[in-house]
Amino acid sequence: MDCTISVQPTPNPNALKFILNVPVKTKDSAVYRQFAECKGNDMASAILKLDYVTEVYFAANFITVTQTGAGDWDKVEARVKETIQAHITRHDPNFEAPGAAPVRPEAGGEIGKVEEILESTIRPALQRDGGDLQVVGIDGKTISIRYEGACGCCPHAAMGTLYAIQNILRDRYDPEVVVQMV
């Protein structure tokens, strides 16, 4: 398999988006923060073992890698590219993600309504930046979300992006909703 990799910076200074010309995850996404979560995904395990790497996020045709901030990005980037090339021929993009699959609009109910709004507004921008979010739950007027990929520890996610998500949901879902990160 001839795999080309281009690297794109993200708004998070501790994350890079590695874009491949082949799929890495055909359905939904997967995030790995611990080796135990990597069962069945040797590429994720190998990347997570690299010095300074704290999180690996797989979606569509890209992998977002987050590091501690202490690593030299040129060196980390080179090692990640080598690791991807070494594992891509054996990688199955149809692998099952760790834990529960993200809830998507087809789930129905209130979470489904929220997901539909996020899918058409905020999610495409997050994915362009190498991340995403998962709706964890709704409790009354409070919607709990978890950022993934480059968004997971991005300084913009806690303030600006969260505020934007809340405003969009107040406009399109419920004017009294409160969005919180978990």
Image: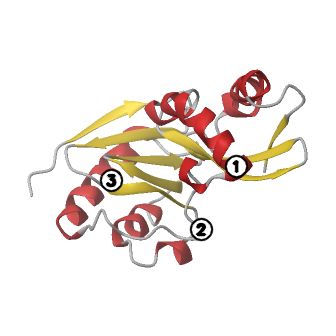
| Residue 136 or residue 61, whichever sits in front | 136
Name the N-terminal-most of marks 3 and 1: 3
Sort mark 3 into few (<14), some (14-19) or many (20+) by Cα contacts within 10 Å: some
Mark 3 lies on a secondary structure that is: helix
Q: Residue at x 26, y 52 (%)?
A: 23
Distance from the alpha carbon under mark 3 to that under mark 1: 39 Å
Observer-nearest of 47 and 131: 131
Give x and y (percent) for residue 118: 61, 35
User: Compared with residue 162, is residue 146 higher up or lower down, i.e. above or below?
Assistant: below
Identify the residue at horizontal 21%, vertical 50% (top origin).
Answer: 22
Q: Are marks 2 and 1 in contact (CB under 8 Å)?
A: no
Q: Is residue 123 left or right of residue 64?
A: right
The residue indicated by pointer 2 is: 100
| Mark in the foreground, 3 or 1 | 1
At label 2, which amino acid type do we have?
Ala
What amino acid is found at the position of numbered circle 3 in the picture? Arg
Q: Residue at x 46, y 38 (%)?
A: 130
| Rendered image: mark on residue 111 | 1
SS under mark 2: loop
Q: Position of residue 11 (x, y in %)?
A: 54, 27
Residue, disc 3: 79
Q: On residue 21, which mark appears?
A: none
The local secondary structure at tag 1 comes to helix
Q: Are marks 3 and 1 in contact (CB under 8 Å)?
A: no
Could you tell me how many numbered marks the image carries? 3
Residue 92, x across and y down, in percent: 27, 68
Quadrant housing the N terminus: bottom left
Q: Residue at x 26, y 67 (%)?
A: 91
